[in-house]
Amino acid sequence: MSRLEKRQEFANQLRALVPQGQVLQSDEDLRPYESDGLTVFKASPLVVVLPATVAEVQAVLKWASKNSVPVVARGAGTGLSGGALPHEEGILLGLAKFNQILELNSEHGFARVQPGVRNLAISDAARPHGLYYAPDPSSQIACTIGGNVAENSGGVHCLKYGLTVHNVLAVTVVTIDGELVTIGAMGCDNAGYDLMALLTGSEGMLAVTVEVTVKLLPVPPVAKLVMAAFDSVESAGDAVGKVIAEGIIPAGLELMDSPAIKAAEAFAHCGYPTDAAAVLLCELDGTQAEVEAQIGRVSDVFNACAATQLHTAQTEEERLLLWKGRKSAFPAVGRLSPDYYCIDGTIPRRELSKVLSRMDELSKEFNLRIANVFHAGDGNLHPLILYDASVEGETERTEQLGSQILQLCVEVGGTVTGEHGVGVEKINEMCVQFDEATLQQFHSVKAAFDPVGLLNPGKVVPTLQRCAEFGALHVHHGQVPHPDIERF
Amino acid sequence: MTNDASNELLGSVREHVVNEQPMHIVGGNSKAFLGCKLSDVDDAATVSLNNHVGVVNYEPTELVFTARSGTLLSDVVQTLKQSGQQLPFEPPQLPGATLGGTLACGLSGPARPYGGAARDHTLGVRVINGKGELLRFGGEVMKNVAGYDVSRVQVGAYGTLGLLLEVSLKVLPLPETTLTLAFEQNEHDTTPMVQLARRFLPVTAAALIGRTRYIRLAGSDAGVQAAAKELGGERVVDNEPWQGLRDLNHEFFNDPRPTWRISCADYTPALTIPNDEDGQPAKVLYDWGGAQRWIKTSLASHALFEIAANANAHATRFSTAMNNEPSHQPISGVSARLQRELRTSFDPLRLFNRSRFHPELDS
Ligand SMILES: Cc1cc2nc3c(=O)[nH]c(=O)nc-3n(C[C@H](O)[C@H](O)[C@H](O)COP(=O)(O)OP(=O)(O)OC[C@H]3O[C@@H](n4cnc5c(N)ncnc54)[C@H](O)[C@@H]3O)c2cc1C
């Protein structure tokens, strides 16, 4: 069967399971689904299916299971690691039609929502009740809660309020064989293993999420933002450690370096000092009394760390404007250069200066500029590499530089991804971070849920073969790992 | 004291794996009363972590603490305290308890609903799986989504997904000020605690004991004093009742009948629990703002499981086995299938702590 015949055959069969118009097959209709936020990877699925009910999701997965057809789930497609990249031989399962908030219980502090509901829509709906959903990725106007659960997304406030995994109570998922099961509980824990923790961050590899129950927290009565400028990134980094040593956990603690400050200021006109080498945004929230006390202490720390400028947002508008600059740092940097590539490593904070100076060297070596935004409180670094895809070889050089930065993060005791996921993007670097036995255990975990490997195949966990090709598997005690596998 | 016994432990697990010899994993043996003991594993070999101790890495400003699993929990708490920090999930400090045992049982204290659970603060683990392989998941950084989150799944798995060698935890500063307020109210009514949870206040524990509601506030002095003024109530001296609730030695637990824990939504109405056969009524204490209910009763396990299931909750027995009855709410359906497969992926021969956690996953 040719690809086109196969596409037609799949579409026909799937149209028996979901309404006609919810199965897309024309090139034009498929194009918007070719990539997620990481556009260097593109692929066309055989068909796109847009189910509107849980029963339809079950029917589609049962069909896929019976016919051994790969399925890739997709939320809003804002992912930055190619997690929602379609499989050429499979179905792209778009969950956009699941956009309803099913229940908002202000009395008991939770919301039950469909997976295609946008992150910000939950907080918008909860706010009239004095509540909100805490994790706030910069993409929150667009990304879906289903995608957030799949990636265990964080936000600028996760230092104090946690990641997605800390703010989700339960999920209802459909397994690859079409069975429906609810994981988690409305209380603080559930019987048996903590499958909720396992599913969060599993990148669509274990099951398809069709409902999510999130915790809603009371909106802090007062939130104040202190902006501090420094004449070196190192002293800003030191200041972060000292705030924490003071026993203060700010609601958010974000660092930007000079290129990022300049880009964000040009984009958002938010009043960042463009002559500073680094800016820290430090948000303190709580009751009036608490916040006032903490602002004083944090300001003292920043002064002691030789802040060149210190400013507390005077109004709520100004506070939001200062955050807007930070939250639009990616598109802002995107205006400086035809293309940019966002890296997402986490490092122990004490290694910051080492990593930054090594990155500086790499930047020169590869002749590519790097701007840095940094979730400084929790060590999650987002170097943005500026490049021009129309210049021959520059995309490849960018990817190599990105890979070197990720390997550097592992070398200093960190990880290749803090919040954007492995997807297809960091699959090689997984070979650097994990040894053979651990990778094999990841494959076994996947098989416990999806024995044939039809959900998002080829992502997240590299095959040992692939690692051998990448040539970077851990060498333990001087032994060459799996010498039985042929090298290429 | 510090000693790395990883190699010995790996060697001994491997030997048992080869012989298909079931193993009991033991830390301080302070939680021997948890889980069920079924007679078919009487011949299990004991693998002790007593000798695998010490802090591996602790840098207070990174808020990360790594130690070997046999390290005494009391030593961990002490070490953190010296740097003005704490384990935010306030685990029970039972005499002899180890860090590994605490995490394997997934125990969290009164702070749980407000400060998060043991799993919430787990960043990384080193484990030996049931095939005798040494594995490392997660790490020592706060944000990490590389691979499945196996570290958190190990928490509360009672060792059935692997023998914990080392754990890395997120730690937090000790609060500047802590104080407890007491209020009189109706028995068995969790509504005031549930309502409190919707307000932004520095609450770190809430319990209802008889007719007294206890609320603990902690945080910056200014914030705590302001909140205390707003809430009113009577100030309680000492750290009561929290230490007793944390360590399960509050006078409530003196009742000689078995202790049960029911974990449910905090707003779940008072559960109807029949009297014991001899007519004695059950006793109930509400912790975690109503989400954790301690029950003293002589009812059979299946009766408690049924009460919990009807309330969308789950029950666990916190007392030594009665007639080999299961101690944890039985799991069924699709969830049981997935959990059984998960157990298989880590310990295909069911060698670790067989039947101790959920026997239905081991058969
Ligand atoms: C400008 C910008 C800023 C960003 N800022 C942040 C940030 O601050 N923090 C952060 O963590 N991330 C950030 N991201 C990354 C991204 O927004 C998040 O990963 C987000 O959670 C993805 O959601 P989505 O709905 O777009 O998912 P998609 O991109 O559609 O999918 C992501 C993954 O989830 C899977 N998936 C989606 N829905 C389901 C489902 N229902 N069931 C099972 N699997 C599913 C997909 O298969 C895929 O593997 C940013 C992205 C952009 C473009």
Image: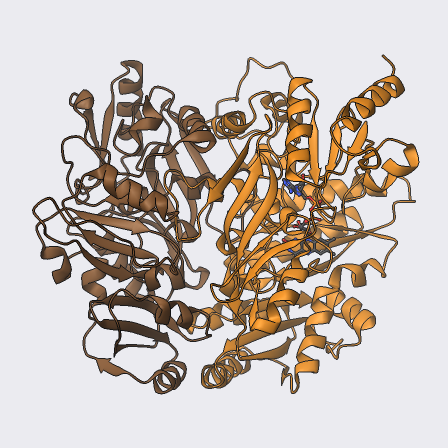
Chain colours: A orange, B brown
User: Which quadrant, please, contains the C terminus of chain A?
Assistant: top right
Which image quadrant for residue A324? bottom right
In this rendered view, identify the residue nearer to me: A420 or A87: A87
In this rendered view, identify the residue nearer to me: B149 or B137: B149
Tell me residue A298's x, y (percent): 51, 79
**Residue at the spot 12% in from the left edge and 62% down from the top edge:** B251
Q: How many marks?
A: 0
Tell me residue B34's x, y (percent): 21, 41
User: Which quadrant, please, contains the N terminus of chain A?
Assistant: top right
**Residue at the spot 76% in from the left edge and 43% down from the top edge:** A36
- The answer to whether residue B187 is above or below residue B351 is below
**Can the viewer see residue B84 in this picture?**
no
Which image quadrant for residue A24? top right
**Can the viewer see residue A301 in this picture?**
yes
As drawn, is A30 to the left or to the right of B180?
right
**Residue at the spot 57% in from the left edge and 31% down from the top edge:** A175
- The answer to whether residue B260 is above or below residue A273 is above
As drawn, is B50 to the left or to the right of A384?
left
**Residue at the spot 64% in from the left edge and 70% down from the top edge:** A232
As drawn, is B139 to the left or to the right of A362?
left
In this rendered view, identify the residue nearer to me: B299 or A10: B299
- The answer to whether residue A432 is above or below residue A372 is above
Tell me residue A70's x, y (percent): 69, 25
As drawn, is A102 to the left or to the right of B299?
right
Tell me residue A354's x, y (percent): 58, 56
